């Protein structure tokens, strides 16, 4: 779950009182968040720079609270949101009412969306914060919230990218376009020279922070770009903003734009940004709207700060929790959680009418309301009861069967190993003498290391790597693994399927083919049901990792459930630097269950 770092003294000032660490931990627990760590700015810098001594001169000794919040509570990703929520929870203030400025359509800023944007990022939403007062702490919190949203709901900018600009340096109306990279030229943020967009992509391949976002657009024939009326570039989403409209501590009017592939998430992100920092506007909690004009003639005005109404019967709230409360008692509990509520009578029963503010995008169903009531009531205050139904827990049949297979192989003198389920493309294909048709392996998007590029489709690479790092051990080396492999499967709703397999590797001065074959026959014998005739046989196979005439497919009840053979030197010697001959057995355990 996300962790938010806030200065303790600034947080306590926003809360209107000081707490001891123990008192604040209790408050966090009661509200449903957790004080994860207490540190200092200097200690954080030392950790980031891997410094072991106290010689770091950067930062100060301000106490930093690291607070863990729920992943779907985007309104708690900054100090402003946490402080406001805790003030409301403790009864120090009521839920604010967010408003959109009542301005004429003529004076409203406009964003024109060009049709080419449909090829790359089709949506954009915008808003303006007027009369903002920044200091260094507020400015840092403003930037940090954008980073937190980018990592969380924005899915590392793939779904939504946020751009914030000094409106006084720009001239509307604005246009959101998609152009070939050679036609986009501007000075990016924190740079002093102009780059063409394609040159900029090459330049940022050496930037530790920005290089992980380049893949989002770098292979597209057009790049998204936002211009003002003077053709000044505001941003090249989702990569970088322009230097011309960069926000400073002197900025008074902030223009916020969010480009997206998911319009719902874009609205949530925009609402979160303006709701958190409109408290610093000249007119508190008031946001100036922006009109977005799409190429099909559709016109939308953002942000949408309207509240969502929800009616929930009282019994649907108190029943799942297991407490007896009336409407008069439930309403103040919901008010503590920023859900303004009142009692109504509809359809012959008493209900709670709940107004969900734009900051609470996590409230989607009556069960979400139940959770908030339980938090406000206090989980420790809910009486303990015995379950009304009897359930018996048990292990999954596949896991139970897997353990029996493990025991059988171990009795044959093999040692179990545990290897990574992720591996490199080279190990999964080239080093096994296999070709990659891109129809088998699940590819990891934007992997952090070349060692973890694909999900394994066989247990062989992991066993060979284990043998490679232990090749000095006395022969024979007999190891095995029982684990999952993952392959692409269009019939599954997620597009891939797990498959539990047994992999056995034998390495000695001789190939040990008869050892592997004997183990396979033993396993097939012990899994057969008594008095049930099941046909088992070996058929010629053509797997590229084995010698052609020293490999077989294992047939069980008319279907292929595995393979065994002597590993080709192209795999063992050239691929994994193993000089001794090896034999390998792999069986689909699920097919035997």
Image (cartoon, rainbow, N blue to C red):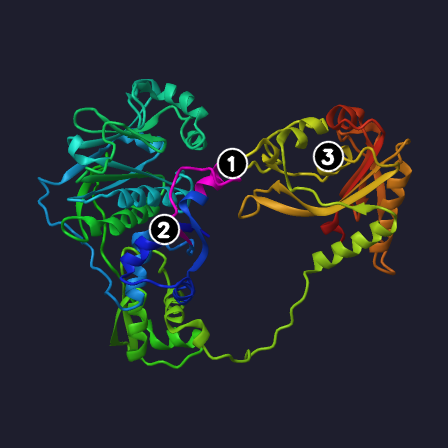
Q: Report crowding for label 2: few under 14, some 14 to 19, many 20 or more residues within 10 A (C-alpha).
A: some
Magenta-colored stretch includes residue 231: no
> Above or below — where is 74 with respect to 87?
above
For discs 2 and 1, the disc positioned in front in the rendered view: 2
Q: Report crowding for label 1: few under 14, some 14 to 19, many 20 or more residues within 10 A (C-alpha).
A: few
Q: Nearer the viewer, residue 55 or 509?
A: 55
The answer to whether residue 164 is left or right of residue 100 is right
> Above or below — where is 464 with respect to 387?
above
**Which residue is rendered at x = 72% and y = 40% of the image?**
459
Q: Position of residue 33 (x, y in %)?
A: 42, 60
The answer to whether residue 440 is left or right of residue 90 is right
**Residue labelled with disc 1:** 445
**Which residue is rendered at x = 57% and y = 47% of the image?**
492
> Which comes sooner in the sequence, label 3 or label 1?
1
Give the distance between the C-alpha atoms of the residues marked 2 and 1, in whole angstroms. 32 Å
Give me the disc on residue 557.
Answer: none
Give me the disc on residue 6.
Answer: 2
The answer to whether residue 150 is left or right of residue 234 is right
Q: Secondary structure at mark 2?
A: strand
Residues in magenta, as a range: 44-66
> Which comes sooner in the sequence, label 2 or label 3?
2
Magenta-colored stretch includes residue 59: yes
**Residue labelled with disc 3:** 465
Q: Position of residue 85 (x, y in %)?
A: 31, 60
Dominant SS type (magenta)? loop
Q: Nearer the viewer, residue 556 or 161?
A: 161
């Amino acid at each position: 779950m996300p962790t938010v770092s806030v200065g303790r003294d600034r947080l306590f000032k926003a809360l209107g009182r000081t707490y001891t660490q123990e008192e604040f931990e209790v408050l966090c627990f009661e509200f449903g968040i957790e004080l994860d760590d207490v540190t200092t700015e200097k200690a954080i810098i030392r950790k980031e720079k891997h410094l072991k001594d106290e010689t770091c001169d950067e930062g100060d000794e301000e106490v930093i609270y690291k607070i863990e919040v729920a992943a779907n509570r985007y309104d708690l990703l900054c100090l402003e949101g946490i402080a406001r929520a805790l003030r409301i929870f403790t009864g120090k203030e009521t839920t604010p009412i967010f408003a959109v400025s009542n301005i004429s359509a003529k004076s409203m800023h406009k964003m024109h969306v060009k049709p080419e944007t449909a090829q790359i990022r089709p949506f954009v939403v915008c808003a303006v914060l007027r009369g903002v007062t920044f200091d260094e702490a507020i400015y840092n919190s403003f930037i940090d919230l954008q980073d937190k949203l980018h990592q969380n709901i924005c899915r590392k900018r793939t779904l939504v990218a946020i751009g914030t600009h000094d409106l006084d340096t720009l001239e509307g109306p604005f246009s959101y376009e998609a152009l070939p990279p050679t036609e986009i030229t501007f000075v990016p943020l924190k740079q002093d020279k102009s780059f063409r967009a394609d040159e900029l992509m090459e330049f940022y391949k050496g930037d530790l922070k920005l290089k992980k976002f380049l893949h989002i657009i770098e292979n597209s024939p057009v790049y998204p770009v936002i211009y003002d009326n003077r053709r000044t570039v505001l941003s090249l989403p989702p990569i970088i903003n322009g230097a011309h409209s960069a926000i400073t501590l002197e900025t008074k009017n902030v223009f916020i734009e969010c480009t997206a592939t998911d319009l719902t998430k874009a609205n949530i992100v925009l609402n979160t940004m303006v709701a958190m920092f409109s408290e610093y506007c000249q007119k508190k909690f008031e946001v100036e709207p922006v009109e977005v004009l799409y190429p099909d003639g559709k016109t939308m005005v953002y942000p949408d700060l309207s509240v969502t109404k929800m009616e929930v019967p009282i019994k649907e709230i108190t029943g799942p929790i297991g407490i007896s409360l009336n409407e008069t008692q439930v309403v103040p509990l919901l008010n503590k959680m920023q859900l303004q509520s009142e009692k109504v009578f509809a359809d012959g029963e008493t209900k709670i009418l709940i107004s969900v503010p734009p900051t609470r995008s996590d409230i989607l169903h009556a069960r979400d309301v139940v959770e908030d009531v339980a938090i406000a009531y206090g989980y420790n205050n809910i009486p303990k009861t015995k379950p009304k139904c009897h359930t018996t827990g048990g292990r999954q049949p596949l896991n139970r069967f897997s353990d029996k297979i493990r025991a059988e192989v171990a009795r044959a003198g093999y040692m179990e190993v545990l290897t990574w389920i992720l591996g490199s493309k080279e190990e999964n294909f080239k080093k096994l003498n296999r070709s990659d048709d891109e129809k088998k392996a699940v590819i990891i998007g934007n992997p952090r290391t070349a060692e973890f590029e694909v999900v394994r489709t066989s247990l062989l690479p992991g066993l060979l790597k284990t043998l490679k790092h232990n090749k000095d051990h006395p022969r024979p080396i007999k190891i095995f693994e029982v684990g999952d492999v993952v392959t692409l499967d269009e019939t599954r709703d997620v597009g891939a399927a797990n498959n539990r397999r047994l992999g056995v590797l034998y390495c000695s001065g001789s190939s040990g083919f008869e050892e592997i074959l004997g183990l396979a026959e033993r396993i097939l014998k012990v899994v057969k049901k008594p008095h049930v005739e099941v046909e088992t046989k070996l058929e010629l196979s053509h797997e590229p990792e084995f010698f052609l005439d020293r490999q077989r497919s294992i047939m069980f009840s008319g279907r292929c459930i595995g393979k065994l053979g002597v590993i080709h030197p192209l795999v063992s010697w050239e691929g994994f630097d193993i000089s001794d001959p090896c034999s390998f057995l792999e069986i689909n355990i699920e097919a035997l269950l």
